[in-house]
């Protein structure tokens, strides 16, 4: 009888340990909370794994199409999503992405001249495209990220507000390209444009603070998505 009780006790402890393991959030899990009825803050741990950054996305349906909120630097561990629609469900996920950026290009735009009329420019030079005759990529980002990095990046000033970027596409398996910018004395890089695979020409209409800025191009792929956080906003202000 005592032996049976001992066996049952051991089994109970083992089952409890398994249940605790299954219910524990994974390392670096995404969490969220309502700061106010219409303001949400998302948090996660920096696991220290080497990555290019993370992208935070949201949807309003459990299996709906996700929208990018922000591309985040590897060291960032929180994001505040403010002024949301009242009484609405939000679903959030976090995805790491991987890939090496090209060397940076510094650009200073000229001051607008008397005849400069940017509103009349059709911006055909800005359309994302694959240049005809461009050599196809031959390197895998997953196998050799440094060899798959974009090269021959050129920044051509087109107007007092616009820059055209071209580069050599070396990757065979990129999921996106990102044009990244660090404006003036900004301490960190941000994503100025998200581009489809195989694109190697794109024009950026700059913001006022980007008259002098550094730019770089990154081919990248996504890692597995985090857990999904579901939150519903409140009634908001009366």
Image (cartoon, rainbow, N blue to C red):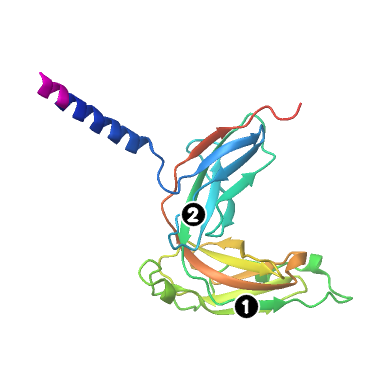
Name the residue tied to disc 2.
46
Residue 187: quadrant of the picture:
bottom right
Q: Is residue 62 above or below residue 216?
A: above
Magenta span covers which residues? 1-6
Question: In the picture, which quadrant includes the N terminus?
Answer: top left
Q: Position of residue 73 (x, y in %)?
A: 56, 60
Q: Which mark is residue 96?
A: none
**In this rendering, does residue 102 appear at all?**
yes
Q: Position of residue 170 (x, y in %)?
A: 45, 75
User: How many numbered circles are shown?
Assistant: 2
Q: Position of residue 42 (x, y in %)?
A: 57, 44
33 relative position to 149: left or right:
right
Q: Is residue 37 above or below residue 150?
A: above
- Identify the residue shown where x is 60% and y is 42%: 41
Give how far apart the Cα atoms at labels 1 and 2 are: 29 Å
Q: Are marks 1 and 2 in contact (CB under 8 Å)?
A: no
Residue 192: quadrant of the picture:
bottom right
Q: Which mark is residue 105?
A: 1
First along the sequence among labels 1 and 2: 2
Q: Position of residue 234 (x, y in %)?
A: 65, 28
Task: Tell us which disc is closer to us: 1 or 2.
Answer: 2
31 relative position to 171: left or right:
right
- Label 2: state its secondary structure: loop
């Amino acid at each position: 009888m005592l032996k049976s009780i001992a066996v049952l006790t051991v089994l109970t402890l083992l089952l409890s340990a398994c249940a605790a393991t299954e219910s524990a959030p994974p390392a670096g899990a995404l969490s969220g909370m309502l700061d106010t009825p219409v303001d949400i803050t998302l948090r996660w741990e920096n696991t220290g794994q080497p990555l290019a950054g993370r992208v935070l996305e949201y949807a309003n349906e459990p299996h709906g199409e996700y929208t990018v909120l922000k591309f985040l630097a590897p060291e960032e561990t929180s994001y505040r999503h403010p002024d949301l629609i009242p009484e609405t469900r939000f679903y959030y996920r976090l995805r790491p992405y991987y890939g090496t950026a090209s060397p940076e290009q510094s650009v200073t735009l000229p001051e607008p001249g008397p005849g400069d009329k940017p509103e009349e420019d059709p911006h055909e030079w800005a359309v994302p495209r694959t240049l005809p005759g461009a050599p196809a990529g031959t390197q895998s980002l997953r196998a050799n990220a440094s060899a798959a990095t974009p090269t021959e990046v050129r920044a051509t000033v087109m107007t007092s507000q616009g820059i055209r970027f071209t580069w050599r596409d070396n990757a065979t398996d990129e999921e996106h390209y990102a044009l990244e910018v660090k404006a003036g004395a900004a301490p960190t890089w941000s994503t100025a444009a998200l581009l489809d695979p195989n694109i190697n020409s794109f024009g950026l209409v700059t913001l006022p603070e980007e008259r002098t800025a550094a730019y770089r191009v990154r081919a990248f792929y996504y890692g597995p998505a985090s857990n999904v956080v579901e939150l519903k906003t409140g009634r908001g202000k009366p």
